[in-house]
């Protein structure tokens, strides 16, 4: 664990070790995490700034010195959101893959209980008409992905990036 992975794990655990060690019940994970944290040969390494495109997930991340901005998309490769009717999870995740943006900064608790309070018809970055589909409505995943949405992606350099997506949906009108 002295390589880059150990360094990244150590930097993430150092952000909030009390919460991690108090909420993780897997004894094997706790043992490995403890070894990484106490190993002085493993130096914490923060993630490098830059632009990162994850085309198999239709996600884009721009990481600055003290923040990260993430963009959530979907295409014929991946569905727009998951909804689990058996456990009633994410029943209103309609627009989380329609250009939703996430801003992460020094406030690690800004998203604590955030999703329960947000108006799911108006997710940040998603341009929609505000009409709420039914629970689990409008899902495009697995065999129901949008086969005509093939133009999702972008390009990047060290300092610049751009992202493009088609915007076709049958459950609501995108502006």
Image (cartoon, rainbow, N blue to C red):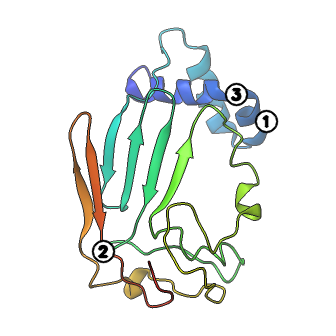
Q: Residue at x 38, y 72 (%)?
A: 78
Image quadrant where residue 132 sits: bottom right
Position of 30 compared to 53: left or right? right
Helix, strand or loop at label 2? It is loop
Q: In the image, which disc is placed on residue 22?
A: 1
The residue wearing badge 2 is 166
Spatial separation of the CA atoms under disc 1 and disc 3: 8 Å
Helix, strand or loop at label 1? It is helix
Residue nearest the viewer, comparing 15 with 104: 104
Q: Earlier along the polypeptide chain: callout 2 or callout 1?
A: 1
Position of 85 compared to 70: left or right? right
Q: Residue at x 54, y 46 (%)?
A: 103
Residue nearest the viewer, comparing 118 with 53: 118
Q: Earlier along the polypeptide chain: callout 3 or callout 2?
A: 3
- The quarter of the image holding the N terminus is top left
Local crowd at mark 1 within 10 Å, few (<14), some, or many (≥20)? few
Q: Earlier along the polypeptide chain: callout 1 or callout 3?
A: 3
Spatial separation of the CA atoms under disc 3 and disc 2: 41 Å
Q: Residue at x 60, y 73 (%)?
A: 93
Q: Are marks 1 and 3 in contact (CB under 8 Å)?
A: no
In the displayed structure, 114 sits above or below 165; it is above
Between disc 3 and disc 2, the foreground one is: 2
Give coordinates of residue 99: x percent, y percent: 44, 65
The residue wearing badge 3 is 17
């Amino acid at each position: 664990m002295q390589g880059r992975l150990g360094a990244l794990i150590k930097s993430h655990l150092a952000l909030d070790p009390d919460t991690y060690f108090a909420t993780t019940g897997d004894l094997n994970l706790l043992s490995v995490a403890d070894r990484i944290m106490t190993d002085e040969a493993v130096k914490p390494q923060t993630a490098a700034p830059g632009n990162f495109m994850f085309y198999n997930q239709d996600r884009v991340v721009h990481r600055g010195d003290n923040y990260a901005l993430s963009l959530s998309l979907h295409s014929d490769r991946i569905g727009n959101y998951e909804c689990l009717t058996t456990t009633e999870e994410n029943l209103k995740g309609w627009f989380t893959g329609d250009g939703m943006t996430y801003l992460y900064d020094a406030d690690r608790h800004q998203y604590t209980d955030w999703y329960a309070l947000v108006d799911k018809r108006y997710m940040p970055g998603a341009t929609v008409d505000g009409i709420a589909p039914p629970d689990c409505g409008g899902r495009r995943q697995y065999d129901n992905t949008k086969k005509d949405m093939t133009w999702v992606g972008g390009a990047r350099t060290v300092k610049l990036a751009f992202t493009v997506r088609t915007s076709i949906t049958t459950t609501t009108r995108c502006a």
